[in-house]
Image: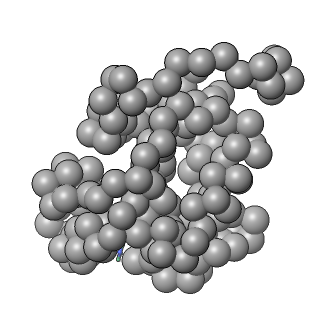
């Protein structure tokens, strides 16, 4: 079953939207495998956003993601990477469809509330950046009988 890394960014924590975001992912049927609140340091931020190094918004992006605590999570489910990306909505909240997290709850590109890995390969890399093995839980969820065919 596929897994993906999700971050509620500092704006989401500050705005009290952690529960709202978790509710949407849980409601869809995704399974929560790991969750923690943490401060992202500059080194972790640089590794996480390495693909954006050299872009005009890179320094500001690192300033933002290190500006306050985030909530990091691993979610599992069928096509979890794509499902989370579709629940998030487009990167620019102005272009994000209503019904998506960004489309319902955000306005500005730099304050778009949530990160989700953009491919299964990136998900593996990002999960390893944010979580150690023992932090990822193995458990049976009885509701899966009614979610997974
Ligand atoms: P996403 O978060 O949807 O995966 P991304 O990986 O392209 O988007 O960019 C990472 C974050 O960087 C994004 O959530 C917001 C910020 N960002 C992206 N493009 C930007 C731009 N042109 N100007 C300012 N910030 C930008
Ligand atoms: Mg991205």
Q: Is residue 10 visible?
A: yes
- For the point 43% across and 46% down, the residue is 36
- For the point 69% across and 73% down, the residue is 104
Q: Position of residue 87 (x, y in %)?
A: 65, 54
Question: In the figure, is residue 141 to the left or right of 149?
Answer: left
Question: In the figure, is residue 43 to the left or right of 141?
Answer: left
Q: Is residue 6 above or below residue 66?
A: above
Q: Dividing the image into 4 quarters, which one contains the C terminus?
A: top right
Query: Viewer-proximal residue, 13 or 61?
Result: 13
- For the point 16% across and 61% down, the residue is 42
Residue 57: which quarter of the image? bottom left
Q: Position of residue 90 (x, y in %)?
A: 56, 65
Q: Dividing the image into 4 quarters, which one contains the N terminus?
A: top right
Question: In the figure, is residue 6 to the left or right of 144?
Answer: left
Q: Is residue 128 above or below residue 137?
A: below
- For the point 30% across and 29% down, the residue is 132
Q: Position of residue 81 (x, y in %)?
A: 54, 39
Q: Position of residue 56 (x, y in %)?
A: 21, 76
**Where does ligand 1 appear, by image quarter?**
bottom left
């Amino acid at each position: 079953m596929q897994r993906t890394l999700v971050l509620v960014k500092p704006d989401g924590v500050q705005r009290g939207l952690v529960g709202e975001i978790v509710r949407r992912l849980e409601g869809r049927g995704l399974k929560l495998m790991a969750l923690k609140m943490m401060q992202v340091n500059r080194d972790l931020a640089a590794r996480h956003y390495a693909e954006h190094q050299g872009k005009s918004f890179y320094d500001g992006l690192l300033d933002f993601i290190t500006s306050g605590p985030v909530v990091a999570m691993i979610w599992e489910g069928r096509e979890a990477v794509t499902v989370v990306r579709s629940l998030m909505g487009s990167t620019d909240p102005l272009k994000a469809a209503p019904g998506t997290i960004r489309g319902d709850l955000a306005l500005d590109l730099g304050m778009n509330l949530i990160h989700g890995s953009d491919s299964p390969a990136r998900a593996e890399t990002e999960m390893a950046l944010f979580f150690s093995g023992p932090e990822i839980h193995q458990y049976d969820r009885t509701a899966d009988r009614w979610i997974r065919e």
